[in-house]
Image (cartoon, rainbow, N blue to C red):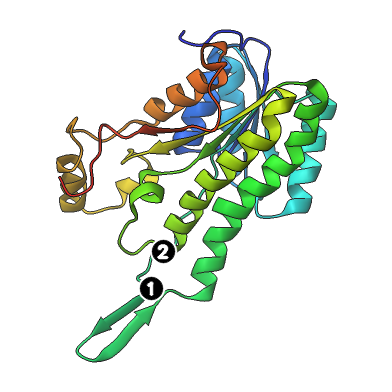
Amino acid sequence: MIATGLTGKVVIVTGAAAGIGKATALAFAREGCRVAVWDVNPQGEEVAAACTAAGGEGRFFAVDVASGEAVEQAAGEVVALWGGVDVLVNNAGIVRDAQLVKYKDGQVLGQMTDAQWDAVIGVNLKGVFHCTRAVAPVMIRQGRGVILNASSVVGLYGNFGQTNYVATKAGVIGMTKVWARELGRYGIRVNAVAPGFVKTEILAAMPAKVLEEMVNHTPLRRLGEPEDIAQAYLWLASDAASFITGAVLSVDGGLVVGT
């Protein structure tokens, strides 16, 4: 185990029913944490059970992070159950990809819609705001806490066809730095992780040629595994990272756009 000081800690992981969120929930559970699995997907029940089997204690909460009311209620339930919140991992995210304007032969063939924009902003950006706002007072009263936010390499470099997604992931970096300044005086650390191309359900649906190009753009010549990102969250939450806040950790295999 790489982590220290995490046994018995209360951890909320959003979007924990699958992919990086599931791997993260299980990683904390193996450290003996009490893990609140937040997701709209009922498959989170299975993840919570797996957390308990892994040596921690898992509970599933059906939460839509885009709803401030739902988040406040779930945060209150976690505190009532376990007495506080030590770590919040804002992992939940969705994609609704489209070009800003698709133009060919003098005609507009398509545009990113308001619905596509609003859906991604609601989960990826507003959701992070909702969850952090709900948990921060708990951590302030405790005099300690760790908040970890999911950004992305595309938040640093941009990506074709992802105006909405990139906007949220760049915004998460900005919020991370603001909250590190505001909450540090209370013993709360706030950091972001920027994954590269990771083997998740989203990537699994992509054509083989696209996946090959992703690998070729990554100096380590492989896609990331969800566990690679989970281990980064685990380390940032641990005592080993006790003097790190306001940082953005790229976990991307050395990804350099254009190589």
Q: Are marks 1 and 2 in contact (CB under 8 Å)?
A: yes
Distance (Cα) linking label 1 and label 2? 7 Å
Residue name at image x 57 percent, y 16 percent: 242
Up-down relation of residue 112 to residue 128 (above or below): below
Image x and y of residue 81, in percent: 81, 25
* Quadrant of the image containing the C terminus: top left
> Which label sits on residue 28?
none
Q: Is residue 203 above or below residue 237?
A: below
Decide if residue 229 is in sight here: yes
Left or right, 188 with reference to 222: right
Q: Is residue 40 left or right of residue 104?
A: right
Q: Measuring 68% from the left and 40% from the top, which residue is drawn there? A: 132
Q: Relative to 119, does residue 113 appear above or below in the rendering?
A: below
The one nearer the camera, 118 or 169, is 169
Report helix, strand or loop for mark 2: helix
| Amino acid bearing label 2 | Thr
Name the spot of residue 206 as percent of width and height, x first.
27, 53
Element assignment for label 1: loop
User: Residue type at mark 1?
Assistant: Leu
The 10 Å Cα crowd at callout 2, few under 14, some 14 to 19, many 20 or more, is many
Query: Could you classify mark 1 by the number of other residues whose Cα lies within 10 Å: few (under 14), some (14-19), or many (20 or more)?
Result: some
Residue designated by label 2: 163
Q: Position of residue 50 (x, y in %)?
A: 56, 23
Residue bearing the label numbered 1: 100
Residue 220 against residue 28 in the figure, above or below: below
Q: Residue at x 26, y 35 (%)?
A: 223
Q: Earlier in the sequence, mark 1 or mark 2?
A: 1
